Amino acid sequence: MRARARSTVAEIEVKKRSLLGRLGAFLLLAVVFAILVSLGTWQMQRLHWKEGLLTAIQEHRSAPPVPLADIEKMLAEGGDIDYRTVTVTGRFDHTKERHFFATFNGRTGYYVFTPLRLEDDRFLFVNRGFVPFEQKDASTRLAGELPAFVGVVGLARPKLTEKPSSLVPDNDLAKNIFYWKDLDTMASSVGLPADKVVPLFVDADATPNPGGLPIGGVTQFDLPNNHLQYALTWYGLAAALVLVSGLYALRRGR
C-alpha cells in the first residue's frame, strides 16, 4: 500500500514538473513572438516616417528659391528648413575656409565651407563643394577663389547641436579637418563672433566654379529605405516560430 502511495505521489510530481515545463516553454515562446512582432511593427513605423521624410525633401527641393530672410524667419518659428532652396548674396572670405572630410563620386577629399559676408556684416557658412585630398590647400585652386560680390543658390541645412555619433572622430582644429559640421567651432576657430554668424549652413548648387573647383551640388539625397524588407523579415520569423512550435506540439501530442 505504501509503495503504491509513493508511486502515485511520484507520478503526480512528474506530471506537475511536466506541466510547469510546458507552461515555461509556452511563456518563453510567447515572449519571443511578442518581441519579433514588435520589431516588425517598429520597422513599419520607421517605413512610414522615412516615406514622409523623403516626400518632404522632394517638396522642399522642388519649391521655388526664397531669400535667406524667409529661411531665417521659418527657422525662428520652428519650421523645417532642411533642403529648402535659398538665394543669398555676399562676398566670400576665402582666408577663413574650413574643410570637412568627405568622399564624392568615389574620391576622398573635403567639402569647402567658406563664410560668406552678407550686406548686413553677418556671416553665412556656405558649403561650396568638393575638392580632392591633394587640393586641400587653397593655393592649389586659386581660380576658384571668387573675389567679387556673388550670388549663391543652394539648399539650407540646419545647424547641428551635437556630434552625430560617438563613433565620429573629434574635429581636428590644428589641421583644419572637420569630421562633423560643428558650426560654432567653425566660426570661433576663425575668429567670427557667434552673434555675427547665421545659425544654419547652405550647400551651394552645381553651378561651376572657375577652374572647376570646388565642385558644387554635393548634397546627399540617397537615404536608405529598407524598412519594409526588415519588417517582413521580423514578421516572417514570428510566423516561422508559430509554425515550428505548432508542429512540435502536434508531434508531442501524437
Image (cartoon, rainbow, N blue to C red):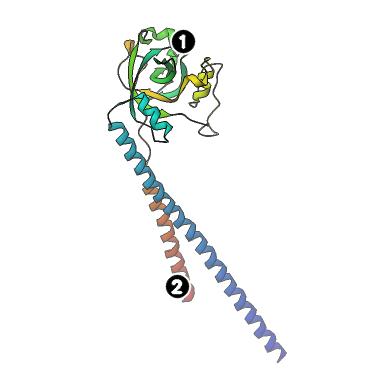
In the image, is 17 to the left or to the right of 118? right
Badge 1 is on which residue? 95
x, y percent for residue 241: 45, 61
* Count of residue discs: 2
x, y percent for residue 70: 35, 28
Q: Which amino acid is tagged 2?
A: Leu
Q: Nearer the viewer, residue 50 or 5?
A: 50
x, y percent for residue 234: 43, 54
User: Which residue is depicted at the point 70% across and 92% down?
Assistant: 1
Question: Which type of secondary structure does the marked residue at label 1 adopt?
Answer: helix
Q: Is residue 22 above or below residue 151?
A: below
User: Which residue is depicted at the point 48% across and 19% down?
Assistant: 196
Q: Is residue 215 above or below residue 11?
A: above
Q: Quadrant of residue 84?
A: top left
Q: Which amino acid is tagged 1?
A: Thr
Looking at this view, name the residue that lies furthest to the right.
Answer: 2
Q: Residues within 10 Å of mark 2 (few under 14, many from 20)?
A: few
Q: Is residue 39 at all visible to an observer of this figure? A: yes
Q: Nearer the viewer, mark 2 or mark 1?
A: 1
| Disc 2 + disc 1, Cβ < 8 Å | no
Q: Which mark is residue 250?
A: 2
